[in-house]
Amino acid sequence: MIWRAVAICILILSATIQVQAQSRAELALKVERLEREMIALENRLRGGAVARPAAGAQGSLDDRALLADLAAKIGTVERQMRTMTGRMEEIEHQQRKLDEAMGLLRKELQLQQQEAADYRANQEVARQDSASSQPVDTAPAATPAVEVPTEPEIALPEGEPSGQYQYAFGFIQKNDLDSGFTAMDMFLKAHPDDALAGNAKFWLGRIHLLKGRLPQAAQQLLALIEEHPNHAKRADALLDLSDVLIGLGSKPDACNALAEFRRSADDASDRLKARAERTAKEAGCTN
């Protein structure tokens, strides 16, 4: 499908550059061969003018026509090389943008891992401080220590995956997106093959989008679209992905995502279809 190009764009661009470079080299060899033929023909014409002055005019005219044809072919190949050079520069520019986006994604993931580690460390310190603040002397005259309230630790409850998913989704329902993201990420890592894994990917992508983390949002939404083609949230994910791509400055890819939405969302709600029309206008889609 067309939208799949977004998911593997880096590999496609790399392969395209290699193909374009190979084609450019072939054109250069073709120009070189035509130029050699043209030089040989010019030498032949000059030699024929001196050595065979009595030869028929028809042969000379044929040679000159061939020389003109070779010159036209060389001009055509050179124009093709210029066009290909411009295309390669455009592709290399797009690849640089994608490399920058992937670099940002790696940094963001590292930051999230560090934040999670810091959070767990802070929770452990808080528990230790709370334990050490309990009074040792239980005599009636002793003043009980005041325990400082701490943030509740986010941990998936024991039990079935469905209950753990509802625990994570409860934070999102309360609009506690940070806690919801942490719990939903824990659920997905614990149950990557569960029936609710697609839902988890959707909500992780949606929270990334709401937080302005566009490369990470694209990664999660594409995972849902690619790995769960029949998921109930696939139509919503395609619309979210089109918003992400517009935010990343890739309106043509956003139009491809919207085209895929139209092809596969016959049963989509009127609300989603109206949103798709508004997004298509914003992206300037013509398809």
Image: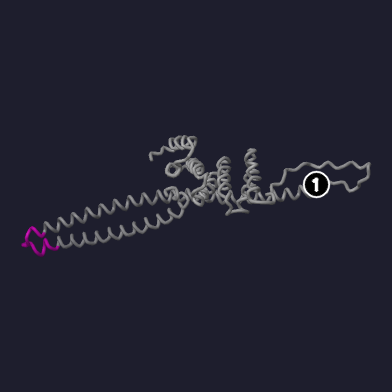
Q: Amino acid at mark 1?
A: Ser
| Residue 228 appears left or right of 119 | left
Q: From the viewer's perspective, is residue 264 above or below residue 66?
A: above
Residue 99 at x, y = what percent?
A: 49, 51
Q: Which residue is mark 1?
A: 130
Q: Is residue 58 magenta?
A: yes
Magenta residues?
Answer: 47-59
Residue sitting nearer the eye, 78 or 109: 109
Image coordinates for residue 164, horizontal then vertical, percent: 65, 48
Total numbered labels: 1
Q: Secondary structure at mark 1?
A: helix
Q: Residue at x 18, y 62 (%)?
A: 43
Asked if residue 37 lies in the magenta stretch, the reply is: no
Residue 138 lies, in percent from the top left, at 91, 46
> Could you say which quadrant of the image residue 180 lies in?
top right
**Percent position of residue 68, x then y:** 18, 54
- At 15% from the left and 55% from the top, the residue drawn is 65
The figure's colour scheme reads one colour
Residue reaching furthest to the bottom = 51
- Who is closer to the viewer here, 287 or 50? 287
Q: Is residue 185 visible?
A: yes
The overriding secondary structure of the stretch rendered in magenta is helix
| Residue 251 visible somewhere in the drawing | no
Is residue 49 placed above or below 206 in the rendered structure?
Answer: below
**Residue at image x 18%, y 61%?**
41
